[in-house]
């Protein structure tokens, strides 16, 4: 198989690092971005000039365009673009400040948008390419205390589904990866937390006592083979779950939605007005 060139944001840890290693170990090249490129030194030492470390804050649109352009100039092509950079914002909806929500959207949504827009002209010119958008089970369902995060991922889902239809004729594929909970630092050092309101203390305690949706977090390293299979597929899906558990969550959620929509269908039809 012909080696591929990847552009991966948030490559210093989590999925970004695992997928960088997976690509490099099989002979591909990777433009790996991070806020601190020193975190990528070991990859450069190990894989040499097949790694291009790039300092990037994805919220900086000009910097995102420059980084993608640099990667294209260095490697001559872009085959896989991975929008992985992001973090979790915790807090009840009432607790969120304006900056909490705006910062979450700037990174998780706009950061992915800037990189995508920067890459599209190159992908169009070569008539191929695969954009991987790292979403979440939280991109199609929602839970308490992470409303800002859900807002960013639901928005990413919508814009990516539109994108997939817009660029298919150019030979460009788009896939939303929707992971379950994994042992990354999404809820650890990278996470941000809104200032808590005491009125929600009882609710928070009840949530802690509730049965866990997923007993054991997934192993990020186990996703390496899955992401390689995905990018090597001639017909990759628009959406794919990573991990054991999201399908059950989605099934319950969507069955509930369908049941409610059907129950209220007479009211919905009445709201349409006359059909003359």
Image (spheres, grey):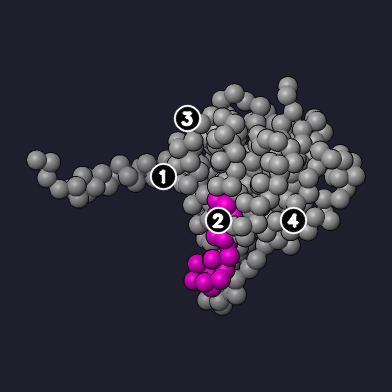
Mark nearer the N terminus (4 vs 3): 4
Graded by Cα atoms within 10 Å as few (under 14), some (14 to 19) or many (20 or more), the crowding at tag 1 reads: few
Mark 3 and mark 1: Cα distance apart in space:
35 Å
How far, Cα to Cα, is label 1 from label 4?
44 Å
Q: Secondary structure at mark 1?
A: helix
**Could you tell which of marks 1 and 4 lies nearer the N-terminus?**
4
* Main secondary structure along the magenta-highlighted residues: helix
Residue 105 seen in the figure: yes
The CA span between labels 2 and 4 is: 18 Å
**How far is disc 2 from disc 3 in space, using C-alphas?**
24 Å
Q: Between marks 1 and 2, how big is the CA–CA gap? A: 31 Å
Q: Vertical placement of 70 versus 227: above or below?
A: below
Q: Does the magenta run of residues contain 100? A: yes
| Mark earlier in primary sequence (1, 2) | 2
Label 3 vs 1, first from the N-terminus:
3
For disc 1, the marked residue is 256
Measured along the vertical axis of the image, is residue 134 above or below residue 170? below
For mark 4, give the secondary structure. strand
Of residue 229 and residue 8, the one placed in the foreground of this image is 8
Part of the protein shown in magenta: 93-114
How many marks the image carries: the answer is: 4
Mark carried by residue 169 = 3
Q: Quadrant of residue 8?
A: top right
Comparing labels 2 and 4, the label whose residue is closer to the camera: 4
Q: Looking at the rendering, in which quadrant would you find the C terminus?
A: top left
Q: Nearer the viewer, mark 1 or mark 4?
A: 4
Q: Disc 4 and disc 3: Cα gap in Å?
A: 33 Å
Q: Which residue is mark 2?
A: 110
Single out the mark in the foreground, 1 or 2.
2
On residue 55, the disc is 4
User: x%, y% of residue 217?
Assistant: 70, 47
């Amino acid at each position: 198989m012909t080696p591929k060139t990847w552009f991966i944001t948030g490559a210093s840890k989590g999925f970004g690092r695992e997928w960088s290693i997976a690509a490099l170990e099989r002979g591909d090249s990777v433009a790996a971005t991070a806020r601190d490129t020193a975190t990528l030194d070991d990859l450069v030492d190990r894989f040499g000039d097949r790694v291009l470390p790039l300092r990037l804050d994805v919220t900086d649109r000009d910097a995102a365009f420059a980084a993608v352009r640099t990667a294209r100039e260095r490697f001559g092509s872009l085959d896989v673009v991975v929008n992985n950079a992001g973090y979790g914002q915790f807090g009840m909806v009432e607790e969120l400040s304006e900056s909490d929500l705006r910062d979450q959207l700037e990174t998780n949504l706009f950061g992915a948008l800037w990189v995508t827009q920067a890459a599209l002209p190159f992908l169009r010119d070569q008539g191929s390419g695969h954009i991987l958008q790292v979403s979440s089970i939280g991109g199609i369902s929602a839970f308490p205390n992470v409303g800002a995060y859900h807002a960013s991922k639901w928005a990413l889902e919508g814009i990516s589904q539109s994108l997939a239809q817009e660029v298919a004729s150019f030979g460009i594929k788009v896939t939303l990866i929707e992971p379950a909970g994994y042992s990354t630092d999404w809820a650890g050092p990278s996470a941000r937390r809104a200032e808590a309101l005491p009125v929600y203390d009882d609710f928070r305690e009840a949530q802690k006592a509730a049965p866990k949706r997923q007993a054991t977090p997934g192993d990020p390293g186990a996703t390496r083979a899955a992401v390689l299979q995905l990018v090597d597929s001639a017909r990759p899906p628009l959406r794919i779950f990573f991990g054991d558990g999201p399908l059950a969550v989605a099934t319950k959620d969507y069955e509930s939605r369908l049941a409610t929509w059907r129950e209220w269908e007479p009211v919905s039809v009445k709201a349409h007005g006359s059909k003359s």
